[in-house]
């Protein structure tokens, strides 16, 4: 341990070093293989066992803590079989799991928490509801994996006594689901939200339109979904979300402290829209619906005023049902849009997003346009574009295909996925740091991290799970845990111990040979 700390001191601040000493010391005694790794864990003597008389309480008057208390009870009741009534209390008593919002605590920030487990009970404190939610996710992983089962299990629900202080490195920790290449219904999206939230991710980016499908109802342009939503890659029936269903997804996500970012990709990746309304194309010709997997062959007509009327309507309707601060306007791989037209197009579309009170996100090619103040650039392929964005004052979301694309195959034997950016094994997906990946893009330039799942080859929820697990917990840890506390070997051991949890959650994961999976 000391050798390792000595090696690490070169790039550690004093605070990180002290946190690291506590955490490494604690980790040695602490068998809890938490992912993401918390900032500070202090093990203590003893343990607390949840039993048939345990109650879940929140301080009187703290209605906002009630939702998390109910959520925790909902997690624990099926597997424990205990009633776990939720109530309020004015004073601490024994055999309780107590959730408490405390006055603003700068050491906890907006998402941090303090979890205390003693032989008397559990006390979870946070300055904001999100912190309580993340403390609950930690508590969940401190319990035996059987807690994830949906039917009563005979287990002892014992939690080792310890203190955890924790908060994230980045405030933006996301996953993207492409529902355009293959459509996934509301139930699948809700499960996806539950899975990412379990690892403390807080962003769901939905890729809602592409050449193969348009997936969100736009009331003023109904053919988008009638025609554009009617198929998908391979020619299946496709589908779309009504605005009511989209609102249901957004509200479910919010209950898990996840913000939805909707993406309408433009001016390329627009075949489904152009087939629905041929006037969106300069030639006025209706393309055929497209069910293949090529990219870069379509563009909106950037010179027609009608194109911007259409975009205004779409973004207005989408902004009205999206409480989060961002609208993603794509902008990638517009190979048949002349560069000058592309720039002019992006310069016209960004103010439409602002007009509806939202901030723009675009893939890294958008850096060629004049970036509005607050436009965020998502680095996926071209470091040069992303550095140009930083020079123009933009914040960057780090999603490098070579590291963070969940549709890249693990190795040459992977049945699903693609490999145009290379094979991405579990160690490759974990062993990198957003703030040192590219010179010229530093910590202060970075909004956060996102792991996209493109679905050209992904058809079922099982397919999603196989590509997402076990890489997503690693990306979640990159977003949450300070670099000084991240180490592949330590992570690999913790990940190996998650396999019984994955099984109890019904997750069809890829058992990577890089990891010693503990049965
Ligand atoms: C992308 O992968 N085309 C953003």
Image: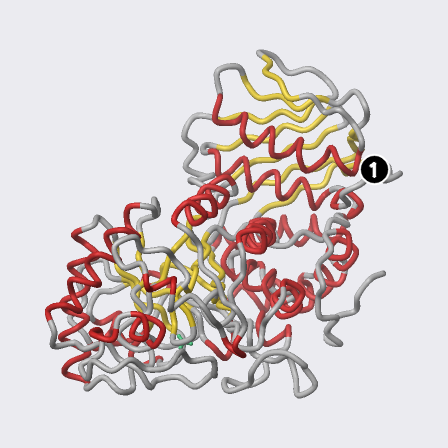
Give the left or right position of residue 363, taking residue 72 as reference: left
Left or right of 412 in this view: 296: left
Above or below, comparing residue 124 to residue 387 in the picture? above
Q: Position of residue 514 (x, y in %)?
A: 72, 75
Residue 229 lies in quadrant? bottom left
| Drawn side of residue 395 relative to residue 155, left or right | left
* Residue occupying image coordinates x 19% and y 84%: 283
Q: Is residue 278 above or below residue 222?
A: below
Image quadrant holding the C terminus, namely: bottom right
What residue lies at 56% left-to-right and 66% top-to-bottom?
A: 8
Q: Quick one: SS at disc 1?
A: loop
Residue at coordinates 54% horizontally, 61% vertically from top-left? Answer: 184
The N terminus lies in quadrant: bottom right
Callout count: 1
Task: Give the residue displayed 80% in from the left and 31% down from the top.
Answer: 81
Front residue of 456/513: it is 456
Q: Is residue 479 above or below residue 139?
A: below
- The answer to whether residue 78 shows anywhere in this view is yes
Residue 291 x %, y %: 47, 80
In the foreground, 278 or 269: 278
Camera-nearest residue between 51 and 265 = 265
If the picture is divided into quarters, which one holds ligand 1?
Answer: bottom left
Which residue position holds label 1?
152
Q: Does residue 18 show up?
A: no
- Quadrant assignment, res 236: bottom right
Left or right of 207: which side holds 482?
A: right
x, y percentage for residue 315? 25, 56
Q: Where is residue 505 shown, x and y percent of the image?
A: 72, 52
């Amino acid at each position: 341990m000391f050798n390792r700390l000595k090696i690490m001191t070169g790039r550690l601040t004093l605070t990180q070093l002290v946190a690291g000493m506590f955490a490494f010391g604690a980790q040695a005694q602490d068998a809890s293989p938490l992912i993401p790794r918390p900032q500070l864990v202090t093990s203590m003597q003893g343990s607390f066992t949840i039993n048939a008389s345990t109650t879940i309480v929140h301080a009187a008057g703290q209605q906002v803590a009630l939702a998390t208390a109910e959520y925790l009870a909902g997690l624990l009741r099926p597997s424990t079989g205990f009633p776990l009534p939720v109530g309020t209390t004015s004073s601490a008593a024994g055999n309780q799991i107590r959730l408490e919002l405390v006055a603003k605590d700068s050491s906890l920030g907006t998402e941090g928490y303090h979890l205390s487990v003693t032989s008397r009970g559990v006390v979870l404190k946070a300055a904001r509801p999100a912190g309580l939610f993340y403390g609950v996710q930690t508590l969940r992983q401190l319990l035996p994996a059987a807690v994830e089962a949906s039917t009563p299990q005979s287990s002892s629900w014992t939690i080792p006594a310890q203190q955890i202080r924790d908060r994230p490195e980045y405030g933006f920790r996301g996953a993207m689901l492409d529902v355009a290449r293959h459509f996934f219904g509301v139930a699948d999206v809700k499960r996806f939200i539950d899975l990412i939230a379990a690892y403390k991710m807080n962003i769901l980016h939905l890729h809602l339109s592409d050449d193969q499908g348009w997936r969100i109802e736009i009331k003023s342009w109904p053919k988008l979904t009638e025609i554009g939503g009617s198929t998908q890659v391979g020619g299946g029936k496709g589908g779309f979300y009504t605005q009511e269903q989209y609102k249901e997804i957004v509200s479910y996500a919010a209950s898990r402290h996840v913000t939805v970012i909707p993406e309408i990709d433009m001016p390329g990746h627009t075949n489904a829209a152009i087939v629905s309304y041929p006037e969106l194309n300069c030639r006025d010709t209706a393309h055929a619906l497209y069910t293949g997997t090529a990219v870069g062959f379509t563009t909106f007509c950037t010179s027609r005023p009608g194109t911007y009327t259409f975009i205004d309507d779409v973004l207005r309707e989408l902004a009205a049902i999206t409480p989060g601060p961002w609208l993603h306007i794509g902008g990638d791989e517009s190979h048949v849009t002349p560069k000058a037209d592309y720039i002019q197009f992006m310069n016209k579309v960004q103010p439409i997003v602002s007009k509806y009170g939202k901030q723009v996100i675009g893939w890294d090619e958008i850096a060629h346009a004049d970036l509005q103040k607050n436009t965020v650039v998502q680095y996926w392929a071209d470091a040069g574009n992303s550095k140009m964005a930083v020079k123009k004052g933009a914040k960057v979301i780090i999603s490098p295909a070579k590291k963070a694309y969940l549709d890249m195959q693990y190795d040459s034997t992977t049945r699903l996925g693609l490999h145009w950016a290379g094979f991405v094994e579990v160690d490759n997906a974990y062993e990198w740091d957003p703030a040192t990946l590219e010179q010229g893009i530093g910590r202060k330039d970075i909004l956060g991290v996102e792991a996209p799942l493109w679905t050209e080859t992904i058809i079922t929820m099982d397919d999603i799970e196989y590509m997402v697990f076990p890489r997503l917990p690693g990306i979640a840890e990159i977003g949450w845990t300070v670099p000084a506390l991240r180490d592949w070997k330590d992570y690999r051991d913790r990940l190996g111990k998650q396999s019984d949890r994955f099984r109890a959650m019904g997750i069809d994961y890829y058992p990577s040979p890089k990891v010693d999976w503990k049965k």
